[in-house]
Amino acid sequence: MKKFAVIAALFLCPMAAGVAKADGGECGEPEGGWAPREAVESKAKENHWTISQIKTDDGCWVIKGTDDTGRGISVDLEPETLVIVNMDYIDPPAPKPAATPAAPKAPPAKK
Protein backbone atom coordinates (compact mmCIF):
# COMPACT_ATOMS: atom_id res chain seq x y z
CA MET A 1 0.00 0.00 0.00
CA LYS A 2 2.89 2.38 0.80
CA LYS A 3 4.36 1.72 -2.62
CA PHE A 4 1.07 2.75 -4.26
CA ALA A 5 0.91 5.95 -2.17
CA VAL A 6 4.47 6.90 -3.15
CA ILE A 7 3.80 6.27 -6.84
CA ALA A 8 0.54 8.24 -6.68
CA ALA A 9 2.28 11.15 -4.93
CA LEU A 10 5.06 11.22 -7.53
CA PHE A 11 2.49 11.21 -10.32
CA LEU A 12 0.19 13.85 -8.82
CA CYS A 13 2.78 16.36 -7.52
CA PRO A 14 3.79 17.68 -10.96
CA MET A 15 0.13 18.00 -11.90
CA ALA A 16 -0.61 20.00 -8.75
CA ALA A 17 2.31 22.31 -9.49
CA GLY A 18 0.93 22.98 -12.96
CA VAL A 19 -2.51 23.75 -11.59
CA ALA A 20 -1.02 26.07 -8.97
CA LYS A 21 0.79 28.03 -11.65
CA ALA A 22 -2.33 28.31 -13.78
CA ASP A 23 -4.46 29.46 -10.86
CA GLY A 24 -1.88 31.91 -9.58
CA GLY A 25 -1.48 33.66 -12.90
CA GLU A 26 2.30 34.04 -12.48
CA CYS A 27 4.10 33.53 -15.76
CA GLY A 28 7.79 34.04 -15.00
CA GLU A 29 10.39 35.48 -17.30
CA PRO A 30 10.03 34.32 -20.93
CA GLU A 31 13.01 32.64 -22.57
CA GLY A 32 12.52 34.22 -25.97
CA GLY A 33 11.36 37.67 -24.89
CA TRP A 34 8.00 39.34 -24.63
CA ALA A 35 5.44 39.32 -27.43
CA PRO A 36 4.81 42.90 -28.62
CA ARG A 37 1.89 44.92 -27.27
CA GLU A 38 0.31 44.88 -30.75
CA ALA A 39 0.14 41.07 -30.56
CA VAL A 40 -1.65 41.35 -27.20
CA GLU A 41 -4.14 43.75 -28.79
CA SER A 42 -4.67 41.26 -31.66
CA LYS A 43 -5.28 38.45 -29.14
CA ALA A 44 -7.97 40.59 -27.49
CA LYS A 45 -9.55 41.34 -30.88
CA GLU A 46 -9.58 37.61 -31.79
CA ASN A 47 -11.49 36.90 -28.58
CA HIS A 48 -13.90 39.83 -29.06
CA TRP A 49 -12.66 41.59 -25.92
CA THR A 50 -12.87 45.34 -25.50
CA ILE A 51 -9.66 46.61 -23.88
CA SER A 52 -9.69 49.17 -21.10
CA GLN A 53 -6.11 48.47 -19.94
CA ILE A 54 -3.06 46.43 -20.95
CA LYS A 55 -0.24 46.09 -18.44
CA THR A 56 2.36 43.64 -17.18
CA ASP A 57 2.12 42.01 -13.75
CA ASP A 58 3.90 39.00 -12.19
CA GLY A 59 5.60 38.26 -15.52
CA CYS A 60 2.32 38.16 -17.49
CA TRP A 61 0.62 40.42 -19.96
CA VAL A 62 -2.67 41.46 -18.29
CA ILE A 63 -5.71 42.61 -20.21
CA LYS A 64 -8.56 44.30 -18.37
CA GLY A 65 -11.75 45.06 -20.21
CA THR A 66 -15.02 43.42 -21.20
CA ASP A 67 -15.94 40.31 -23.15
CA ASP A 68 -18.41 40.20 -26.05
CA THR A 69 -21.34 40.06 -23.59
CA GLY A 70 -20.19 43.19 -21.74
CA ARG A 71 -19.03 41.33 -18.65
CA GLY A 72 -15.83 42.64 -17.02
CA ILE A 73 -12.72 40.48 -17.45
CA SER A 74 -9.12 40.32 -16.29
CA VAL A 75 -6.96 38.00 -18.43
CA ASP A 76 -3.36 36.94 -17.73
CA LEU A 77 -1.41 35.91 -20.83
CA GLU A 78 1.90 34.06 -20.99
CA PRO A 79 4.31 36.79 -22.18
CA GLU A 80 5.90 34.97 -25.11
CA THR A 81 3.15 32.75 -26.55
CA LEU A 82 0.11 34.73 -25.32
CA VAL A 83 -1.53 31.56 -24.02
CA ILE A 84 -4.24 32.37 -21.45
CA VAL A 85 -2.84 31.55 -18.01
CA ASN A 86 -5.75 32.87 -15.96
CA MET A 87 -9.08 34.56 -16.70
CA ASP A 88 -11.32 36.14 -14.10
CA TYR A 89 -14.73 37.65 -14.57
CA ILE A 90 -15.17 40.90 -12.73
CA ASP A 91 -18.65 41.43 -11.40
CA PRO A 92 -19.90 44.98 -11.64
CA PRO A 93 -20.30 46.78 -8.33
CA ALA A 94 -23.66 46.28 -6.66
CA PRO A 95 -26.08 49.08 -7.47
CA LYS A 96 -26.57 51.64 -4.75
CA PRO A 97 -29.97 51.46 -3.10
CA ALA A 98 -32.41 54.08 -4.27
CA ALA A 99 -32.70 57.06 -1.99
CA THR A 100 -35.75 56.79 0.21
CA PRO A 101 -37.88 59.89 -0.09
CA ALA A 102 -38.17 61.85 3.13
CA ALA A 103 -41.42 61.36 5.00
CA PRO A 104 -43.76 64.32 4.65
CA LYS A 105 -43.79 66.65 7.60
CA ALA A 106 -46.83 66.40 9.81
CA PRO A 107 -49.08 69.47 9.74
CA PRO A 108 -48.80 71.67 12.82
CA ALA A 109 -51.08 70.67 15.66
CA LYS A 110 -54.31 72.70 15.88
CA LYS A 111 -54.89 74.81 18.96
Image (tube, rainbow, N blue to C red):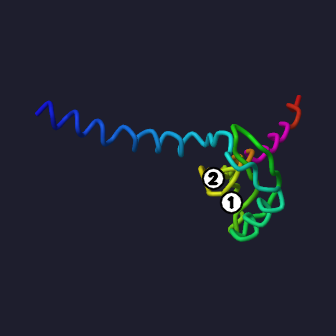
The CA span between labels 2 and 1 is: 7 Å
> For mark 2, what is the residue?
89
Magenta stretch, main secondary structure class: loop
Q: Position of residue 83 (x, y in %)?
A: 62, 57
- Please report the residue visible at 79 percent of the width from the left and 44 percent of the height from the top: 99
- SS at badge 2: strand
Q: Position of residue 110 (x, y in %)?
A: 87, 32
Q: Is residue 1 above or below residue 15?
A: above
Q: Nearer the viewer, residue 46 or 101?
A: 46
11 left or right, relative to 18? left
Q: Mark 2 touching mark 1, by CB under 8 A?
A: yes
Q: Is residue 95 above or below residue 8?
A: below
Local packing at callout 1 (Cα closer than 10 Å; few below 14, some 14-19, many 20+) is few
Q: Nearer the viewer, residue 50 or 29?
A: 29
Magenta stretch: give its range. Answer: 97-106
> For mark 1, what is the residue?
71
Task: Locate the N terminus and report the quarter of the image it occupies.
Answer: top left
Q: Nearer the viewer, residue 107 or 30?
A: 30
The amino acid beneath tag 1 is Arg
The amino acid beneath tag 2 is Tyr
